[in-house]
């Protein structure tokens, strides 16, 4: 038995061994300057959307920009059903319309830090990251992710949302406005979960059971803190989903 104990102990900690292996744990702290949050509202049933999809895919990856592609469902009746579309994404776009400065809801629509931003068509420079108004840390243990949000001075309330975001998706449209085209997508929001508001003067801890991403597609869990009154993003962070982070 004494000879077997070292071998058994080695199995418990050996890389790649799943015997009694603890759930992977990792964390990230949002930068002092909050990333520029870019939300694209798009649809595979919209013939003018592929250029916007390509523009979003070309945005720099890093701490300075957080890109999110929300596929809406109101063009599904045109002959091609977008498998990434969700009524929750459509509802979010309509909820943002009044405060974004847009006169109406449309696709493709780019919203940058809560404001309608048609300058993407002219390759306008994105706003630079601004000093964060709240602190944010994400901690993942297995599939459970916790967002630790710091307090903000002054009155008012904070809100936010979770998202599971996947990359490297392709669709071959066989009908609808994009019939015959291969559509490529990055930063696709596969699950969107808003959270209830809370008083800005107190810190908050929120947990989310992250969905399992589609196999073969790099994925991240994202949390965005917003001003509850204006929906303006104040801070954001992301964590990769793969084991070991």
Image (cartoon, rainbow, N blue to C red):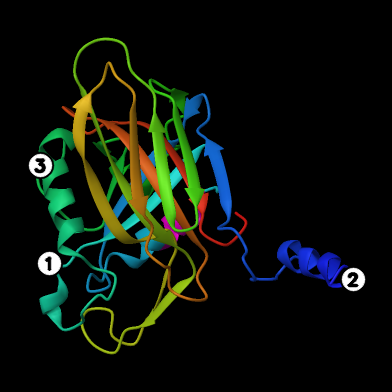
Q: Residue 46: x, y in percent? A: 23, 70
* First in sequence: mark 1 vs mark 3: 1
Classify mark 3: residues with Cα within 10 Å, few (<14), some (14-19) or many (20+): few
Marker count (numbered): 3
Residue 236 location, quadrant:
top left
Residue sitting farthest toward the right? 3
Q: Which mark's residue is nearer the viewer, 1 or 3?
A: 1
Q: CA separation, marks 1 and 2?
A: 66 Å
- How crowded pointer 1 is (Cα within 10 Å; few <14, some 14-19, many 20+) is rated as some
Question: Of the numbered discs in the image, which one, if any, rests on residue 195?
Answer: none
User: Start and end of the magenta stretch?
Assistant: 54-59
Toward the viewer: 6 or 177? 6
Report if the CB atoms under discs 1 and 3 are less than 8 Å apart: no
Pick the front one: 139 or 118: 139
Task: Tell whether position 221 is magenta.
Answer: no
Q: Residue farthest to the front?
A: 1
For image coordinates 28% across by 32% down, the residue present is 226
Q: Position of residue 41 (x, y in %)?
A: 26, 56
Looking at the magenta stretch, what is its main secondary structure? Answer: helix
Quick check: 199 above or below 87? above
Q: Residues within 10 Å of mark 2 (few under 14, many from 20)?
A: few
Q: Which residue is mark 2?
A: 3
Q: Secondary structure at mark 2?
A: loop
Residue highlighted by disc 3: 103
Q: Which residue is mark 1?
A: 74
Position of 77 with respect to 82 (left or right) is left
């Amino acid at each position: 038995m004494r000879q077997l104990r070292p071998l058994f102990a080695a199995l418990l900690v050996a890389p790649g061994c799943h015997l009694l292996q603890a759930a992977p744990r990792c964390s990230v702290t949002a930068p002092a300057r909050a990333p520029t949050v870019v939300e694209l509202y798009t649809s595979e049933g919209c013939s003018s959307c592929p250029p916007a999809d390509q523009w979003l895919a070309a945005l720099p990856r890093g701490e300075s920009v957080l890109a999110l592609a929300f596929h809406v469902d109101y063009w599904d009746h045109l002959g091609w059903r977008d498998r990434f579309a969700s009524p929750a994404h459509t509802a979010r776009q309509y909820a943002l319309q009044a405060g974004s400065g847009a006169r109406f809801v449309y696709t493709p629509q780019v919203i940058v830090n809560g404001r309608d931003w048609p300058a993407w068509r002219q390759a306008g420079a994105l706003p630079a990251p601004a000093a964060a108004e709240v602190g944010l840390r994400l901690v993942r243990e297995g599939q459970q992710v916790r967002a630790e949000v710091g307090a903000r001075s002054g009155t008012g309330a904070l809100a936010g949302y979770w998202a599971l975001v996947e990359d490297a998706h392709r669709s071959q449209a066989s009908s609808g406005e994009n019939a015959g085209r291969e559509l490529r997508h990055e930063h696709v929001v596969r699950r969107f979960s808003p959270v209830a508001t809370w008083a800005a003067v107190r810190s908050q801890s929120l947990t989310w059971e992250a969905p399992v991403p589609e196999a073969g597609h790099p994925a991240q869990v994202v949390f965005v803190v917003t001003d509850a009154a204006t929906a303006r993003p104040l801070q954001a962070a992301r964590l990769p989903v793969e084991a070991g982070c």
